[in-house]
Amino acid sequence: MATQSVSERRVTTPQLGPSGGTRGALATSLSFWLAELLKYAVLLTLAVTFIMPFYWMLSSAIKSDSQVYTVPPIWFPIPQHWNNFWDAWNSQNHWRMMYNTVVLYAIPATIGTVLSSALVAYSFSRLRWIGRDTLFAVVLATLMIPAWVRLVPLFIIFKQIGWLNTFLPLVVPHFFGNAFFIFLLRQFFMSLPSELSDAARIDGANELQTMFRIILPLSVPALAVVSLFTFMDSWNDYLGPLIYVNIEEKWVLALGVQRLRNAVAEIGNRQLAYPYLMAVSSLITLPIFLAFFFAQRTFIEGISVTGLKG
């Protein structure tokens, strides 16, 4: 039997011509760049759409009242009235309102929510006791109760115990936990290795020591999310102070902004009403913007971990 020659056994493969290969590479490159261009165009459109209201607020804050109502709108005001920020802030007692908002309301509410929610979440995630999962389901079920349903009963209770015109109705409920934040922290605590708690117990630590010395220091991203959300809710809260606080000396910033809105609606001989409203709104928005800007890495890390693990 004759052996096949090397040339006969050689496997030949079809080769694309130079023109066909070039056209395919160009088509692939063109589709890739078109997809990238479309993606960035959509992102740019969304970014401009998101930023435009903030720019309009800032530009309106440095306008005169006549410039605000000019048609077509003035996007770059000339001259620019930067003194509107100082004049608007001092048009009311905003320093007192800021003290009430931050010191008497937002900070105590944030501390209460973080402590109470962390304690309950630790119990639901790291401890084993009869009925734990059932009670956790009950806690989650409370999220389906609208806040409007509780509004009148709570007002009657707080009125009967003499808490009206104080910050107690706004702060004390935060020390009894928040169902959503309990769920969020529970998910994060469950993602931590159980060996950490076991090692702490072997070393003689009780549950509170284990929680405050081991678990909470490792849960900074989740705690940052809870803190930021609670602080923002308290900072922007309008309905609660409107219902429970009727003394002007205890007003918060949201009520002060509402007074400026009323001044715009009832504009008569008052000057710069709308620019004052925009100036104060810009100053009130600034702390929240800065807090998110400097804590965004921790904030996003906490959201991603609590959303994907547990």
Image (spheres, rainbow, N blue to C red):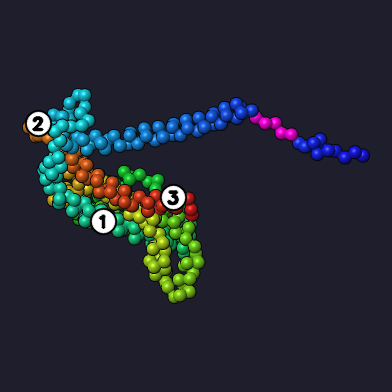
User: How many residues crowd around disc 2 within 10 Å: few (fewer than 14), some, or many (20 or more)?
Assistant: few
SS of the residue at dot 1? helix
Given contact means CB atoms under 8 Å apart, are the residues at marks 2 and 1 in contact?
no
Image-quadrant location for residue 216:
bottom left
Q: Please, is residue 92 above or below residue 36 in the view?
A: below
Query: In the visual, does 293 lie left or right of 252?
Result: right
Secondary structure under the numbered disc 3 in the rendered image: helix
Gap in angstroms between the C-alphas marked 2 and 1:
38 Å
Left or right: residue 171 versus residue 222 is left
User: Residue 304: which numbered mark, if any?
Assistant: 3
* CA neighbours of label 1 inside 10 A, class few (<14), some (14 to 19), many (20+): some
Lower sequence index among marks 2 and 1: 1
Nearest to the observer: residue 220 or residue 181: 220
User: CA–CA distance between discs 3 and 2?
Assistant: 51 Å
How crowded pointer 3 is (Cα within 10 Å; few <14, some 14-19, many 20+) is rated as few
Residue 141 % position (x, y): 42, 49
* Residue 14 highlighted magenta (yes or no): yes
Residue 127's place in the image compared with 239, above or below, is below
Residue 261 x %, y %: 18, 37
Disc nearer the start of the sequence (3/2): 2
Q: Tell me if residue 186 comes above or below residue 258 in the rendering.
A: below
Image: magenta residue range: 12-16
Distance of label 3 from label 1 (alpha carbons): 25 Å
Q: Residue at label 1?
A: 107
Q: Name the residue under label 2.
A: 268
Asked if one can make out residue 270 in the rendered structure from this viewpoint, the answer is yes
Residue occupying image coordinates x 12% and y 35%? 272
Along the horizontal axis of the image, is 275 left or right of 203? left
Q: Which residue is farthest top? A: 71
Residue type (three-letter) at the residue carrying disc 1 = Ile
